[in-house]
Image: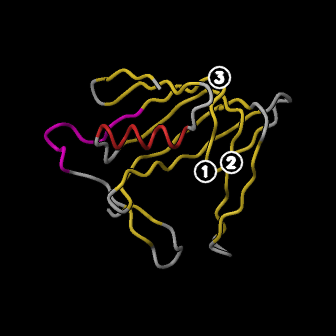
Amino acid sequence: MRYKQLKNGYLIRIMKDEELITELTNFCKEKLISGASLTGIGGVSKCEIVYFSMETTQYSGKTFNEQLELLSITGNITIVNKQPFVHAHVVLGDKNMKTYGGHLKSAIICPTAEIIITELFDEKESKLKIERKKDEISGLNLMEL
């Protein structure tokens, strides 16, 4: 991973064969990021996306073992159990221009991913954070606002 600090966040390049969620989570731990949004583009060689069903309160997913374009990644970074949590959704495209979308569980990057993290708090607010707590209705960890 390589990065450049911006006025209110970071421009990040994830390298080939790195796992996206792991790299972003470790980066957020290192930089003490506790509330941010993220966007980006790139490519993956292996990826797992999931869909949450309110009916069953379970995730079901699909793993792709092929090169796909990471057409869009968008999400946020919050805190769960005192640790950074990367919550991201993606749109992926295959060589036939067919698209797939869902909650990103994991992704191996190929050839690269370009991510922008925009922090929601400035230095004066550095002790602020957005935490997630388990919601009784959905069973999901939702933002505490």
The residue carrying pointer 3 sits among few (fewer than 14), some (14 to 19) or many (20 or more) residues within 10 Å by Cα, namely: some
Residue under label 3: 111
Q: What residue type is labelled 2?
A: Glu
Q: Which amino acid does label 1 sit on?
A: Lys
> Cα distance, mark 3 to mark 1?
19 Å
In terms of secondary structure, where does tag 1 sit? Answer: strand
Q: Is residue 15 left or right of residue 66?
A: left
Q: Which amino acid does label 3 sit on?
A: Pro
The residue carrying pointer 1 sits among few (fewer than 14), some (14 to 19) or many (20 or more) residues within 10 Å by Cα, namely: many
**Farthest residue, direction left:** 124
Q: Do the residues labelled 3 and 1 touch (CB within 8 Å)?
A: no
First to last magenta residue range:
117-127
Where does the image place residue 71, in percent across and percent down from the top left? 65, 31
Q: Do the residues labelled 2 and 1 touch (CB within 8 Å)?
A: yes
Pointer 3 or 1: first along the chain: 1
Residue under label 2: 48
In terms of secondary structure, where does tag 3 sit? Answer: strand
